[in-house]
Image (cartoon, rainbow, N blue to C red):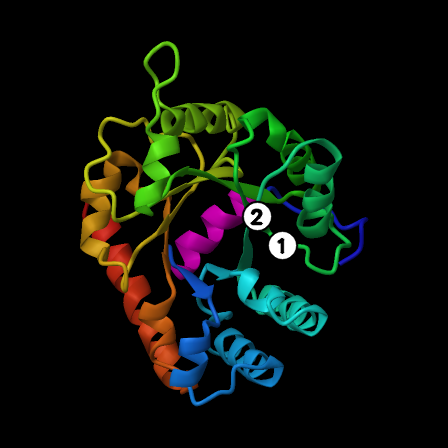
Amino acid sequence: MTSTTVLEPFGARLRRAMDERGPLCVGIDPHASLLAEWGLNDDVAGLERFSRTVVEAVADRVAVLKPQSAFFERFGSRGVAVLEKAVEEARAAGALVVMDAKRGDIGSTMAAYAESFLRKDAPLFSDALTVSPYLGYGSLKPAVDLARESGAGLFVLALTSNPEGGEVQHAVRDGGRNVGATMLAHLAAENAGEEPLGSFGAVVGATLGDLSAYDLDINGPLLAPGIGAQGATPADLPRVFGAAAGNVVPNASRGVLRHGPDVGALRRAADRLATEIRTAVTAS
């Protein structure tokens, strides 16, 4: 992709992909244990075989693929090269790629992180990037600005499913609003007036239970980890997300990946889960 390419905004592209393919995000998470389950060595060759198999199996049918960059970075430059190829091939097959890197810093460092994943001619250019706002939401401005310029998006950690997250995200600020709700409000402001969907989403765990105390109507997508191995099911989505369920992008990793390395089994698992999610959300 060259720097002259003009992309439709991420939110519009995501809305269309969800409507056409179903609202499912499949993680590419090559844990050492999962490589072993597939009969692969925990090395660059195993990493490449795993990644290519997942992309071959599901990139032409799911809305989003979400590689976890840490599992590639641990192999150094050769692992990053595998990640670059996976991103390129997934996007070529029609899937949107959300890079799960959870970057967060200030000033020129945040700008450099943004350029690594959101500059249109970058080797790791992705349709969206996960970011951490806990140096202050304003610290994300370089990423917000470059995402707008590139037609990309962000997913900001807001209400995560890990138990430790609550000590920060549930902390109450002056005025009575907690930190997680503050992040949602910032994102709603970023997405104001965008149609059919804004490009700035939140990460909100599907395992959190009743979230009716939060305004999840941010006019943007909600990336929801927790489906499958972490205990949440498609049927939980309307209860957890309420009226915002139609903008949820549920993420499943092991629930799909454990069916590998057989390509057909991976496809059937992804298709089945996408159908279950669509049915649950439509019924709500």
The quarter holding residue 84 reads bottom right
Residue 96 badge: none
The kind of secondary structure element at disc 1 is loop
- The range drawn in magenta is 10-22
Seen at 40% across and 53% down, the residue is: 19
For the residues marked 2 and 1, what is the alpha-carbon distance in whole angstroms? 7 Å
Where does the image place residue 272, in percent across and percent down from the top left?
Answer: 28, 70
Q: Are marks 2 and 1 in contact (CB under 8 Å)?
A: yes
Q: Is residue 270 visible?
A: no
Circle 2 residue: 129
The quarter holding residue 148 reads top right
Where does the image place residue 2, in percent across and percent down from the top left?
Answer: 80, 55
Seen at 72% across and 69% down, the residue is: 77
Where does the image place residue 181, in percent across and percent down from the top left?
Answer: 37, 26
* Quarter of the figure with the C terminus: top left
In the image, residue 4 sits, relative to residue 76, either above or below, namely above
Q: Is residue 87 magenta?
A: no
Determine whether, in the image, residue 147 is placed left or right of residue 259. Answer: right
Q: Magenta residues: mostly which secondary structure?
A: helix
Seen at 54% across and 75% down, the residue is: 51
The kind of secondary structure element at disc 2 is strand
Determine whether, in the image, residue 237 is placed left or right of residue 57. Answer: left
Determine whether, in the image, residue 270 is placed left or right of residue 47. Answer: left
Circle 1 residue: 126
Question: Outermost residue, bottom direction?
Answer: 39
Question: Outermost residue, top direction?
Answer: 175
